[in-house]
Amino acid sequence: MPSTLHEIVEYRPSDIEWKVTAGIWALELIIYTLFIKIAAGILLDRTKMQAQPEPAPPIQNATTPSHPA
């Protein structure tokens, strides 16, 4: 890589550059994991927004009174 003095020098990333690169990769993996988790829930139809069936009303027997006297 040419330097400001027009000499060819070898480039080595600093520790800060390696840490920034590792942080970017970690953030990308977290976002990817969240997207996969959301997509798997949608594809497997496990969302919380599904309509729940209403329970059937209790059946009262005509021979037994509903209120004791």
Image (spheres, grey):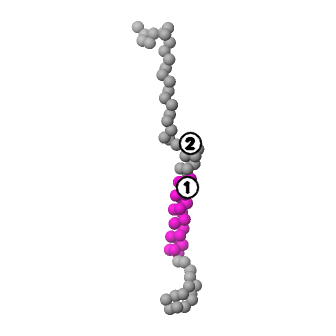
Query: What segment is highlighted magenta in the picture?
Result: 15-36
Residue kind at label 1, given as amino acid type: Thr
Q: Nearer the viewer, residue 47 or 13?
A: 47
Name the mark nearer the viewer: 1 or 2: 2
Query: Compared with residue 55, is residue 6 higher up or lower down, i.e. above or below?
Result: below
Sequence-first tag of 1 and 2: 1
Residue to which mark 1 is pinned: 33
Residue 26 in the magenta stretch? The answer is: yes
Q: Are marks 1 and 2 in contact (CB under 8 Å)?
A: no
Badge 2, how many Cα within 10 Å: few under 14, some, many 20+? Answer: few
Instruction: Find the distance from the CA under tag 1 to the CA under tag 2.
Output: 18 Å
**Occupied quadrant, residue 66:** top left
- Image spot of residue 14 (x, y percent): 53, 77
The residue that appears at 50% across and 24% down in the rendered structure is: 56
Q: Nearer the viewer, residue 16 or 39?
A: 39
Q: Secondary structure at mark 2?
A: loop
Residue kind at label 2, given as amino acid type: Asp
- Image spot of residue 18 (x, y percent): 54, 72
Badge 1, how many Cα within 10 Å: few under 14, some, many 20+? Answer: few
Residue 5 in the magenta stretch? The answer is: no
